[in-house]
Image (tube, helix red, strand yellow):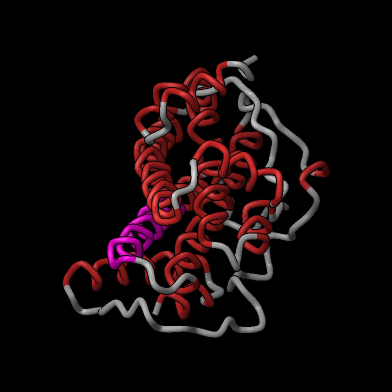
Amino acid sequence: MALDVLCEREPQTKATRARELYAMAQEGAASIDPAALLTAPAELPGRPELPPLVEPGSLKRRGMQTEAGRAVLLHALAHIEFNAINLALDAVWRFPSMPDDFYLDWLKVASEEACHFSLLSARLGEFGHVYGDFPAHDGLWEMAERTRDDVLARMALVPRTLEARGLDASPPIRKRLAQAGDHASAAILDVILHDEIGHVLIGNRWFRHLCDAVGADPHTTYARLAEQYRAPKLRGPFNFEARRDAGFDEAELRALAGLDD
């Protein structure tokens, strides 16, 4: 069922179905079979024809003092959340032989990312736009492709790296929205940051679970995987409070402090 939702192309339908699937799992209406082995369809993930996907460097930044600039920002955030739905669903169907809680955790993440996408899409509509109106990039899914055969790498490099960057980026974006008088958009960022702390905590939980299972040191393992899979280089400023709440240990935070701007 998670794979079927992942294949859904229409964004709002995908978001609705992701939330429904998590509710079904909670109620026991959808069962978990960790031994099931599924074959990936030819094209993943399901997504609409728009937005066009371009190189990140070709995307222009716009200021938040204008409605046009804030619309571009909201669209970029909605694209991140749409991809985050796909990433969570992909973790559910792709990786067998994990504890049941692993699948429930990522169904919960998919549901919450779907809520974020819906909030941002509705706010974008108030600016006279829909998801797909502006170009976007595919960086998040590219990392999913690289780590498709390695659950340990997936846990290390998607929630603990790419999504954790959102913990750092959200507060300054929220501040700039509030300074521009856009308190409705700023309030959505508050919801997203709160939930994303939990999502990164889930990533940390399962990364450490997998490291413990093979007797691997999480710090050296992370460094090896980041290099092997060409993870983005970390750079500050960092949201140390949010990262601590999300399960990063003090040794990791000290290492980040050495990279802070």
Q: Quadrant of the C terminus?
A: top right
Classify residue 18 as left or right of residue 165.
left
- Give residue 75's position: percent from left, percent from top: 59, 47
Q: Quadrant of residue 186?
A: top left
In this view, the residue in front, 169 or 226, is 226
In the depicted structure, whether residue 29 falls above or below residue 53: below
Observer able to see residue 118:
no
Q: Residue at x 45, y 22 (%)?
A: 240
Quick check: is 123 in the magenta stretch? no
Q: Residue at x 65, y 34 (%)?
A: 69
- Give residue 217's position: percent from left, percent from top: 49, 41
In this view, the residue in front, 260 or 212, is 212
* Most distant residue in the left direction: 27
Classify residue 123 as left or right of residue 257.
left
- Give residue 158's position: percent from left, percent from top: 55, 50
In the depicted structure, whether residue 44 falls above or below residue 59: below
In the depicted structure, whether residue 247 falls above or below residue 8: above
Classify residue 122 as left or right of residue 131.
left
Q: Quadrant of residue 242?
A: top left
Q: Quadrant of the N terminus?
A: bottom left
Classify residue 131 as left or right of residue 142.
left
User: Which residues, given as a range, are shown in magenta?
Assistant: 99-117
Q: Residue at x 54, y 27 (%)?
A: 173
